[in-house]
Image (tube, coloured by chain):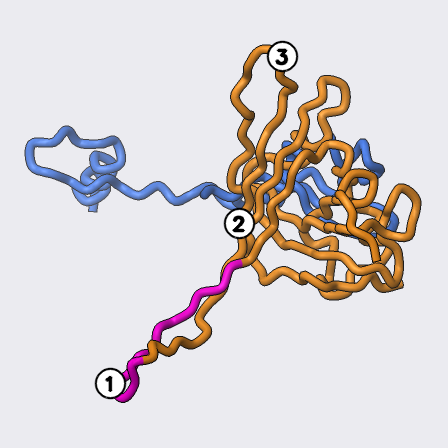
Chain colours: A orange, B blue
Amino acid sequence: MARLIPNENTWIGFAAAGSITDIEAPTAAQVAAAIDLTGFCISLNASSRGNTVPTPSFDSLFETSTAGTSAATFDADFYRDDDEDTAWETLPRGTRGFFIISRFGGSGTANLPVSGDEVEVWPVMVTSRTMANMSSNTVLTFTASCSVNVEPAEAATVAA
Amino acid sequence: MAKLATVKIEKDGIEGEVTREALKAWERNGWTAVDDGSSDEPAEAPAIVPAQQVRNAPKTDSAKADETKKENG
């Protein structure tokens, strides 16, 4: 067991809409075909949130609740690049696709997830792609905000 | 939101679909465009519907044409 930071461990890729047929088990080829955005990513927030529905009744002073719906949000910050602006060009507003996240890194070259590795697959649609405020002595970055249009696979395993 | 122009792409037998705007980035990563996205264009031009006639409003060309048609039987 080790506690780690994402640097030189995490791998992040973006797969085109329709290129992953089973988000619970993307194939190694489908993952390898994704655009590697690891080198552009500064921060990433892929989170899900559940709602609870209150179910109190007259026969108890304890306020009970039951499980309700759940939702997810996805946004990430990336660098711009005046030579190969891969992240910016890959994620225009309206883009559909899948973010593939290997938080602990895959077993392949440069942490690429391969068969048997665990990944998260987030089906998304980019709702906004906006530049960060420009200021002196600050690197140019942007934020991609996405809707999560299908329940994400948070414990998918890469298939052969 | 209006439907964006998309392009079907392919790499190593895997197919996908991306916006035309993003195509350059995917081509740099070894994907090739399968079609030019022309399927996104409507197959037929939208029908021309005469504007609703309102009293004292100027007649549109299509309304005038309708009247001429009626007069000629």
What chain does mark 2 sit on?
Answer: A
User: Toward the viewer: B26 or A147?
Assistant: A147
- Are labels 3 and 1 on one chain? yes
Q: Is label 1 or label 2 in front?
A: 1
Whether residue A16 sits left or right of residue A132 in the image: it is right
- The residue carrying pointer 1 sits among few (fewer than 14), some (14 to 19) or many (20 or more) residues within 10 Å by Cα, namely few
User: Toward the viewer: A21 or B47?
Assistant: A21
Against A48, is A97 above or below?
Answer: above
Whether residue A1 sits left or right of residue A53 in the image: it is right
Q: Is label 3 or label 1 in front?
A: 1
Image coordinates of residue B48 in percent, x first then y, are: 35, 41
Q: Name the residue beneath numbered marker 2.
A: A147
Image coordinates of residue A80 in percent, x first then y, are: 67, 24
The amino acid sitting under disc 3 is Asn
The amino acid sitting under disc 1 is Phe
Q: Is label 3 or label 2 in front?
A: 3
C-alpha gap between disc 3 and disc 1: 62 Å
User: Which mark, by number, is residue A137?
Assistant: 3
- The residue carrying pointer 2 sits among few (fewer than 14), some (14 to 19) or many (20 or more) residues within 10 Å by Cα, namely some
Image coordinates of residue B39 in percent, x first then y, are: 62, 45
What chain does mark 1 sit on?
Answer: A
The amino acid sitting under disc 2 is Ser
Q: What stretch is highlighted in magenta?
A: A49-61
